[in-house]
Amino acid sequence: MAADGGTEGRADTYGHCDPRFSRVREVFDAHFADGEELGASFAVFLDGEPVVELWGGVANRRSGRAWERDTPVLAYSCTKAVTATAAQLLAERGLLDVTAPVADVWPEFARRGKERVTVEHLLTHQAGLPALEEPVPVEEFEDQAAIADRLAGQEPIWEPGTAHGYHALTYGFLVGEVVRRVSGKSVGEIVATEISGPLGLELWVGAPDDVAARAARLSAGDRPAEPAEPTASTASTAPSAPTAAELPGQGPGDPVYEMARASLDKDSLLNRALGNPPIHRLRGGANHPVVLRAGWPAMGAVTTARGLAGFYRDLVAGRILRPETLRDATLRRVHGPDRVLFLDSSFGLGYMRPALSFLTPARGAETAFGHTGMGGSLGLGDVEHGLGLAYTMNRMAGAVSGNLRAYRLAEAVYESLPRTGQAR
């Protein structure tokens, strides 16, 4: 595709790119040329206008099916920001008080020292419930209320409100149950009827059968993503774990090293948080239809890059939440060492803020918000810069230290923005 917006292919990639953002196209193409991608898509809206939409590669390595403009894919934890928005919609309408105890709307939650846990604690990963204690049977995967009840019966690992640690999967079951108790609807139903449907977004929290059938198939590194014991970082999963001598970082005590070391220990809090419900027990792992249709509110979003970027475009424009609601929801509530990830993380009310776990170019360090997804996906909004962007892909990052594809693309976007005093 030429920089003037033509649609001819180049380096097996297609789409359009405003000439001002030609650097973005160069980075996107380089990822394919360097062998970092299997299939991927990247979309950017600036002040509501589409300035970049690129795609390329293959959606299914086994069949060779091409990645098309409308190819959806599981975006893992990018879902958390969508779920946070559903909760904020309820709060904005006066149906949910995020400062109130969870037990006010979910009485069964007030067990084993959780009487004072607030909805804000859930949204900011401070509840002390980052992992389910008992393995969730496969038969229960689509019964979110049953999984939530398991969490209601658990004791927090730390005193709620005194620390934060990434609730990789439990975030969704906890916040999702609060949403269900207040509204009578699942997060996926609210997204479909009040966000994606009215706004025409290709974004589902729980994919319909036809969407699941054409979704890209996730692959881990150089082989298809089949059942495996999970290891993870802030944005990636490793198909084969390195030895201790090969770990990144500067040795014991360094957060990057400690996170990578935890990924090697199947009993670490990191892997317990990521590995239950045990998706690896399903054939094809996260590619299994059960996962795609279950709509887990922490990782169940199936979307195109255009759909996820459009979600942030509409958030930034005030079409989903009132500007004052979004401004409050994206204020940093917690920042610092993460009890699960070891790296510094920062959260508003469910939205990630720039930190080592959410790498953001310098121009967005104080203004960007959004969420990463395991494997490398990214959704990002920036009110000050008028941005909504998203990156989706199916080749899961293969390094425990993370993958920089999304960061490089976001960096190219910010570098392409006009400087102060220039017209946008």
Image (cartoon, rainbow, N blue to C red):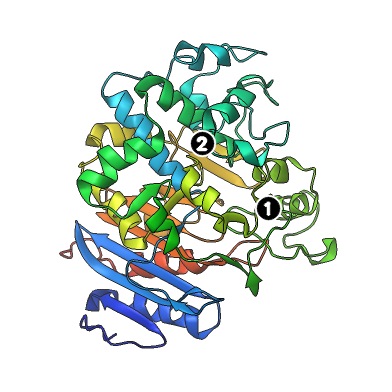
**In the rendered view, would you say 163 is above or below 358?**
above
Percent position of residue 168, x then y: 59, 42
Question: Left or right: where does residue 45 sit relative to residue 401?
Answer: left
Quick one: 34 or 131, which is closer to the camera?
131
Q: Amino acid at mark 2?
A: Gly
Gap between marks 2 and 1 measured at Cα: 19 Å
Of badges 2 and 1, nearer the viewer stands 1
Which residue lies under the disc numbered 2?
172
Question: Left or right: where does residue 293 sit relative to residue 155?
Answer: left
Question: Left or right: where does residue 414 sit relative to residue 272?
Answer: left
Question: Left or right: where does residue 198 sit relative to residue 361?
Answer: left
Q: Using a 10 Å C-alpha cutoff, classify the residue at mark 2 as few (fewer than 14 neighbours), some (14 to 19) or many (20 or more).
A: many
For residue 353, say whether it is visible: no
Quarter of the rendering occupied by the C terminus: bottom left
**In the rendered view, would you say 309 is above or below 125?**
below
Badge 2 marks a residue whose secondary structure is helix
Percent position of residue 116, x then y: 55, 13
**Do the numbered discs 2 and 1 sit on residues whose CB atoms are within 8 Å?**
no
Indicate which disc residue 322 carries: none
Quick one: 92 or 289, which is closer to the camera?
289
**In the rendered view, would you say 62 is above or below 206?**
below
Sequence-first tag of 2 and 1: 2
* Rendering quarter of residue 105: top left
Q: Residue at x 46, y 82 (%)?
A: 30
Quick one: 304 or 325, which is closer to the camera?
304
Which residue lies under the disc numbered 1?
280
Q: Residue at x 61, y 20 (%)?
A: 152
Number of marks present in the image shown: 2
Badge 1 marks a residue whose secondary structure is helix
Quarter of the rendering occupied by the N terminus: bottom left
Percent position of residue 384, x then y: 27, 50
Q: Amino acid at mark 1?
A: His
